[in-house]
Amino acid sequence: MAQHRIIPTGEWGAVPAKEAITPAGTPHEIIFHHTDGHHPELDHKPTESLDEAKAFARAIQNDHMHRPPPKGPFIDSGHNFLVTRSGHILEGRHGSLRAIEGGRMVVSAHCLGHNTNPGVEHEHKGGEQMTPAQREASVWLFAHICRKTGIKPSAIHPHREFNPTECPGVLGSGLDAFKRDVAAKLAEGPD
């Protein structure tokens, strides 16, 4: 089993947020997203290096901070965490990792009406499923968030449940099994 860690914004080269990040209270759900794309320079195979994963996180942040209305621009990455196809986990919006470690959240911009709860992006395009490394890292991340905040695995929701979107694409069809795996990981005890 791989060792997992969350790569903070300072390690992947995030630019500063345009405005102060607003703290939020204790979250009660996790929103499951997909990126609906890959970093444009990658070969679209699930073998990206850590440097490539960091470049993808920077590309997403740049897109979120410069996209035109009504889907932007945001003050920072809209999501709280990103899980790449090679299993790298990266913090999205500044302060998300510190907030989760304290059992709280920051206000983000990933799901209208639910932005005081963590949103996790999964690198994905089209009919792809998660790679084994990506799924393992994602189960670990969701269990970690649940352990730190008290969120129950049953409170993991697909983005499309709340907003008019296809997100998380085909990944949404496997969400029930994913929740069971997160619950099993939690039952194993601390990270």
Image (cartoon, rainbow, N blue to C red):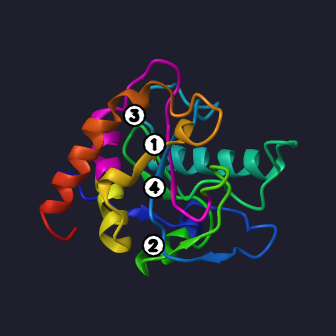
Mark 1 and mark 4 in contact? Answer it, CB < 8 Å. no
Look at 41% across and 77% down and name the residue there.
101
Residue 107 quadrant: bottom right
Give the spatial CA distance, label 3 vs label 2. Answer: 28 Å
Q: Are marks 2 and 1 in contact (CB under 8 Å)?
A: no
Amino acid at pointer 1 = Thr
Amino acid found under the numbered disc labelled 2: Ile
Up-down relation of residue 133 to residue 13 (above or below) = above
* Element on which disc 3 rests: loop
Q: Which residue is most to the left?
A: 188
Q: Residues within 10 Å of mark 4 (few under 14, many from 20)?
A: many
Q: Which mark is residue 30?
A: 4
Q: Secondary structure at mark 1?
A: loop
Query: Residue 38: percent from the left, percent from the top?
Result: 57, 32
Q: Say which label, 2 or 1, has the lower sequence index.
A: 1
Q: Is residue 168 above or below residue 18?
A: above
Near-viewer residue (85 or 174)? 174
Q: Is residue 49 left or right of residue 14?
A: left
> The C terminus lies in which quarter of the figure?
bottom left
Residue at left 35%, top 57%?
Answer: 141
Disc 3 marks which residue? Answer: 47
The boundaries of the magenta stretch are 115-139
Residue under label 2: 100
Q: Residues within 10 Å of mark 2 (few under 14, many from 20)?
A: many
Q: Residue at x 72, y 60 (%)?
A: 76
Q: Residue at x 56, y 31 (%)?
A: 42
Q: Nearer the viewer, residue 45 or 138?
A: 138
Residue type, numbered disc 4: Ile
